[in-house]
Image (cartoon, rainbow, N blue to C red):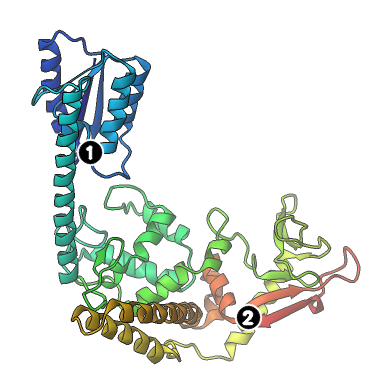
Amino acid sequence: MGLYTRISSDTEGLGLGVGRQEDDTRTVAGLRGWDVACVYQDNDYSAFDVKVRRPEFERLLADLEGGAVDGVVAYDLDRFARQPADLERAIRIFDTRPGLVFATVQQDLDLSTSDGRTMARVMVAFANKSSMDTSRRIKRKNLELAQRGVPRSTRRPFGYEDDKVTIRPAEAELVRQAARDVLAGMGLHTIARRWNELGVRTPYGNPWLQSVLKSMLVSPRMAGYRIHQRDIARDAEGNPVMAKREPLLDVSTWESLCAVLKDPERTRRHTYTGGRKRLLSGLVRCGTCGVPMSCDKDFRRSIHTYVCKQQTTRGGCGTVAVSGPRMDELVTALVLRYLSDRAVVHEANPWVDEQRLHDVTTRISELMAAFTAGELTGAVVFPAVSKLEAQADELREARAAWLRDQALIVNRPENVASVWPELDLDRQRAVIESVISAVVVKPAARKGGRFDPSRVEVVWR
């Protein structure tokens, strides 16, 4: 005999609910003279959500079908199944294995008889409807809270106290410094490592991972937006809703941060563990075939070489190579000389299409407001909104690219030449990328010759 226990929500993880169910189902099994062979426990698992797979329920069905157990005792039928499809799976097994027994603590129910199955189907249908009604009410309530900007989360967000509203100053400053560092070119791996070394932990008490840090920084919550269903909550007119708490970052900083961290090129640049290892990795291109050159290290002499390798995935002629240290020195000198004649920019230039994006989003809000008020039909509103949203998406992509370029320029340090030795590799690369888009290396006149600066062509932005 197998005992099945389940509870949908166990926020404290103590398993008290399923523990009480086990005690009661053992009592029922004992009164009927059934020996308990196994306990199947799905703690903190929903039986209503079709996307949730209950591992112990699946194991129970497999054991029933395979003959490992000869029946089930559950606390109640709705603990066993709340989806008709799950009940039918169990009934099919009872069909193929005559003699299986089924009992609950709350009432007698025999799945081996037609009357018992009919009653079970009716009970599960009602339980399913009850869950649907509850789900609908909860979703409506959550939407109402979101549109009112009321913060709601099961655990405190990083940067806030346990009330989820009051800012925790030490954590808030860490977030703001991380934003400044990312915009200045520092990699997330460096920031995560620094936080872990300082003993900073996530709200779950775990060390920081690069992926977790990125998810937090790009979350709209950072800029004060209310989140609903993993996106910015919007009111009936489609306008973004601000949460009723002070944000950790201003909107413009957060938008720049998202533009940098969501850049597809950034993902490709940081395919190596811990980010790029060399100053010009990804920037140096072969002058023969145009493919980005790789970096090889001579461990005997502790020097590196930029080489064009023949690769099946991205091509490469395999005929061009150049000394890494000499290339790094040359490009660094050129960049520092270039920047020495230019003033440091602290404020971004206005984006030329800002008003156009504002007009498009305003028009979308106006159309949705007209639909909500019953002034226009959906047949008129939604095709127009779809076209406007496509325009808005294109404009936002262009704006993100502009923000990425501006972030590199605005966050360049002053007196670059004097502080250059103090900058880490990420910051040095960011400075170089703010003024250079590529460094092209032409083939050498003869193999093994001395480094020839004339082979190098810098493509300035």
Residue lying at the far right of the rendered structure: 446
Left or right, residue 229 beside residue 441: left
Is 247 located above or below residue 203 in the figure? below
Q: Residue at x 62, y 67 (%)?
A: 279
Labels 1 and 2 touching (C-beta < 8 A): no
**Residue at the disc numbered 2:** 335
In the rendering, at what x and y percent does residue 273 appear? 54, 53
Left or right, residue 241 beside residue 258: left
Q: Residues within 10 Å of mark 1 (few under 14, many from 20)?
A: some
| Closer to the eye: label 1 or 2 | 1
Decide which of 328, 17 is in the foreground and name it: 17
Q: Residues within 10 Å of mark 2 (few under 14, many from 20)?
A: many
**What is the quadrant of the N terminus in the image?**
top left
Q: Residue at x 25, y 69 (%)?
A: 233
Whether residue 102 is visible here, answered yes or no, is yes
Is 301 located above or below residue 420 in the figure? above
Res 225 quadrant in image: bottom left
In the rendering, at what x and y percent does residue 63 appear? 34, 20
Identify residue type, mark 1.
Asp
**Residue at the disc numbered 1:** 44
Decide which of 43, 287 is in the foreground and name it: 43
